Image (cartoon, rainbow, N blue to C red):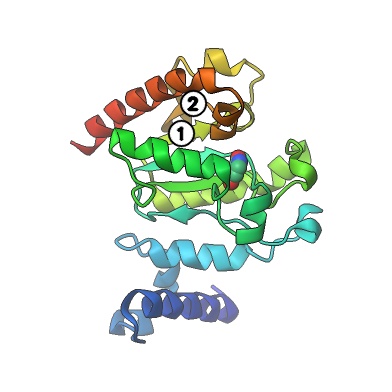
Amino acid sequence: MADADIIRGLSAYLEARRELEGGLYLEDSLLESPGQLYCRSEDNFPSLAVFEKDISGCMKCPLGKTRTNFVFGTGNPHADIVFIGEAPGRDEDLQGEPFVGRAGQLLNKMLPQYGLKRSDIYICNILKCRPPGNRDPLPLEIELCEPYLWKQLEIIKPQILVSLGRIAAQTLLKTDAPLAKLRNNMHQYRNTPFFITYHPAALLRNNSLIDSAYQDLAKIKEYYDKVKS
Ligand code: URA
């Protein structure tokens, strides 16, 4: 590993520790072998923070020039369940966090009805930057950005994935099957059980879908409880 990488990792690790514990300290084992910063299996928070730091200046596609903030993802870095949306919208772009707008607020109200809090889950998007005018992600943007999601999932190691909405589901499964069909089955994405439900923005637009969305959440929670027990 290059010295610059080690120093970047070290700095992100110290920042994470400072946030958590209000002070600076470095374990002796890390001083002896700073390369561990990238692969501490018992504590993945520094790795996720390091990864965010590494990629948050991404300029691989033109969205790098139009974004306000890079929206990496938020939540429990040890989550058993990860929710995946399509791309940041206007509020997310402005605040640098996924699902903070009206759709996110609806999700925050729905999750607790099934015993899930935002702080239990991890949430992110396929694209980390907002497409102008909230248009659908372009194939090149997906090709360049989806590997960041793969790496996040490798670090978090969740047991369940949930796609929020048709676009995220079709993109991840490389299919054009309709959402109504996709949400009836459990799928696999990168060897992890993968559920599909409505995007909360669709529920805001069409209230009649809400019962079906709650049925999906009930099914997901049943599976989550099985995994946790
Ligand atoms: N829609 C998404 O797909 N993601 C967000 O973060 C917000 C809205």
Label 1 beta carbon less than 8 Å to ligand 1: no
Q: Is residue 226 visible?
A: yes
Q: Identify the mark nearer the N-term, 2 or 1.
A: 1
Left or right: 150 as drawn, with respect to 76: right
Q: Quadrant of the N terminus?
A: bottom right
Any atom of ligand 1 within 8 Å of the CB at mark 2?
no
Q: CA distance from mark 2 to mark 1?
A: 6 Å
- 21 or 57: nearer the eye? 21
Q: Secondary structure at mark 1?
A: strand
* Residue 41 screen position, x and y as percent: 33, 60
Residue 162: mark: 1
Residue under pointer 2: 196
Q: Residue furthest left?
A: 229
Q: Amino acid at mark 2?
A: Ile
Q: Quadrant of residue 133?
A: top right
For label 2, the crowd category at 10 Å Cα-Cα, with few meaning under 14, some 14 to 19 and many 20 or more, is many
In this view, the residue in front, 66 or 64, is: 66
Residue 79: image location, x then y, percent: 35, 48
Q: Residue 179 at what x, y percent from top left?
A: 58, 19
